[in-house]
Every structure is written in C-alpha cells, then in structure tokens.
Amino acid sequence: MKTLRMLSGLLLSLGLFSTSLPSLVAAEKSVNSTQSVRFVGPIAAGEVRPHVYKLAGAEMEGRGTARGKRLAREYLIRQYQELGLKPLFPDGGFLQQIPGKTADDGRPTVRGINVGAWLPGSDAELRDEFIIVSAHYDHLGILGGRIYPGADDNASSMAMVLEVARQLKKQPNPPRRSIVFLNFDLEENLLWGSRWFAAHPPWPIEQVKLFITADLLGRSLGNLPMQSVFVLGSERAPELRTVLQRVGSPRGLQVERLCTDLVGTRSDYGPFRDRRIPFLFFSTGEHPDYHTPQDTADRIDYEQLARISNLVLKIVADVADADSPPEWATPPKSDFAEVEALHRITAQIMAAHDGGVLNLGKVQRFFVSNIHTKLGSIIERGDLQPHERPWLIRSAQFLLITVF
Ligand SMILES: [Zn+2]
C-alpha cells in the first residue's frame, strides 16, 4: 500500500463513479447474465466495529510483536471456530507456519504464521473449486516505544473477512463453491505470507477460481469527504465487471474500477496474479494516518466499512454460485472506466486547489489541468488508443506523487 495511497486519494477525491458503469460494460461477456443474486446480508456497522476495536486494541501491540501477533491469531481462530468453519490446513489446524532460516544450532525457525478456515461448497461438482477472501493481519507493532495500532491497515479488512464469513456460514443453502477465509502474516515484509501460501497451498492452486484481498477499507484518501472504494484486477478477468454490475453497490458507496498496473503490486494479490488466478483488490486508499500511531479504531468510518463488506459478500456469493467461474484474460482487457475516473479526479484536485483545500504549485496546477483536458478529449472521442496508455500510467503516477 504505497503508491495506491496517492492514486486512491485522487480517485476518492472525485468519487462520482457509481455502479451503473458505462455502456462498454454492458457489452462484456457475462459469467451468467441471467443468474439471480443470492440474498445475503446486510452486514451492519455495529458488526464490523467490535473486530476493529479488538484487533487494533493496545493489547494486540500493533500486531507486530510475537505476543501481539499471537493474540491476533487466537482472536481470528476463535471467531472461525465459533462460526463453525473448518480448519484449512492439512494437519487439521487453522495455522500455516512459514519457515525461517535454520538457526545456528541447526534447529528450524518460524518466520511467520498464516491463519485459514473454510466453508465447504454445497455442490458436489464445484466443491473442489475455491474462492479466497483474505486480509493480512500483521502490522508494524511497536516502534520507538509507540504502538502502531493499524486499525485501517488492516483490522478494517479483517473485520470484513470475519463478517463475510458469518453471513455465508449462516446461509441455509451454502454457496456452491467452497469459500476460504485467509489472514496472511508478513504482508508488511514483502508479502512473505501470501507468497508462501501461494507456493504451498493445501490443494493445487489452479483450483482457486477467484482471489479477493483487501487492505485499508475504513478511511478515505487524504481524508477527503469521498465515499469510494477502489476495485482493481477486473482487467484480468473482465467477467468480474459483469459481476460487479449485477450485484450493484450498497447505497452511498461509489465503486471505482482501476487497472492494477496504474499502482503496481501493493498488497497480497501479487503472488496470485503471478499465477494467473483471477483476483480483485479492494481499498479505500491511503491517508495521512497511514503507517503512523494515529491509525486508530476511532477514526474508522464503520458505515463505509460495512457497505464495502456487503459489496464483497455479494461478489463472493455471486461467483460461488455461478455456473462457470471467471477466466484469466491474456492480454488484460483495458477498462475505459479508469479514464473517466482519472478525469473526475483531476477535476476534483483542481477544485480542491482552487477552494484552498489543497495547495498545488503553479507548475503542478498547470500539469493537472493539462492531464484533465487531454482525458476530456479522450472521453469525447470514446476510446483510449494503445499508445496513450503509457501516458495514462505516467499521468496517474504524476498525480499520485505530486498531489498527494
Ligand atoms: Zn496493509
């Protein structure tokens, strides 16, 4: 979650995108356009809030000390057990140890520990296909004597995973495919936990039909008053755009689709994307409290977190019940939605500058204005030429770096 901070901020700062995506979406091949949406949820703010307060509480020590991480794992396991979910790993447990270097005396060491549970699918033929819903549980711990609570990063997403699990488990008729709930360790250490899992899954990794992860779900970029969530990854499985359209968006939530190459590898989807597993990444973006001791539970927008949790819940239920799963697209399928998103963002940035909320230099203001104008002409023309995409990526990065 580095550069996404800035892009998210940009996007959040506009946030006009709604679920009725432009007409190009309507032409997308559907997973099954007639499929009805299962009735699930809703997840309420009061249900996600206690998880965040607990996981970002002082006793968890920023989930970066041995004790704090153990307490976080114990909390997660207790939740999964109370829900009646099955342990994920072959030894019959909820934990997957990630080995470290061999110690000087030759003994093995443990570098980290992933947590996982699952809900078996109800369809005998589809039960061996898996949908993963994940959120890393580690954070920065205690630095310089101060606790870094990591409420947004990433207690917010763990709360989403737990409540999605609760809703799916209580369905009288479980989803057809199996659902896996995962909490990776060592995301803050080069994604070590998810990389280990992807290399050592409990079943062949090809059986994972959709990988979902989330990082930072409870704030907004730059604390701008936007109600957006960024959804990345549909360029690699365009049917997921149809799914997004079909499930709609909880009232008050703006869904902004981006292609992943605008921000690079920012979280645990990296190792799954590298194995060509269709994926979606959800984030509300970074903010000034990101990776500081001020990332506290009282600053989370719980209504927003509940809305996003409901969105993820519906997507998971939809894909789990579909006749056929999303398929990996080579090459990735471009998404005009990101052009329109950046167009709105640049307008918002200029408005923030002109309104005194954001202070840009003269040159910055000039470049933002130029980008905005060019995006406007691309929208008018109705398509993005292949040679313009590198420009789009550079522009997004410029906006990220310069403005936020
Ligand atoms: Zn994170």
Image: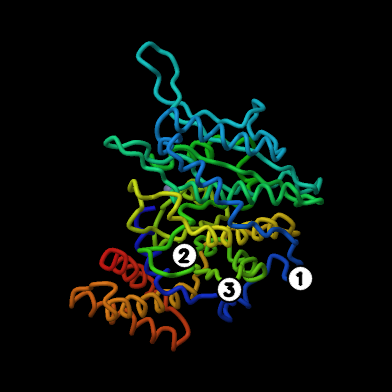
Residue 174 position, x and y percent, is 77, 49
Q: Earlier in the sequence, mark 1 or mark 2?
A: 1
The amino acid at mark 1 is Thr
Nearest to the observer: residue 113 or residue 286:
286
Give the quadrant of residue 339.
bottom left
From mark 2 to mark 3, how far is it between C-alphas? Answer: 16 Å
Residue 226 position, x and y percent, is 44, 70
Q: Which residue is mark 1?
A: 34
Badge number at residue 97: none
Q: Earlier in the sequence, mark 2 or mark 3?
A: 3
Nearest to the observer: residue 237 or residue 289:
289
Q: Secondary structure at mark 1?
A: loop
As drawn, which residue projects farthest toward the top?
105
Q: Which residue: 38% across, 58% down? A: 286
Q: Which residue: 53% across, 62% down? A: 304
Q: Earlier in the sequence, mark 3 or mark 1?
A: 3
Give the quadrant of residue 45.
bottom right
Q: Look at the numbered disc 1 and say if its residue's Cβ is closer than 8 Å to ligand 1.
A: no
Q: Which residue is mark 2?
A: 259
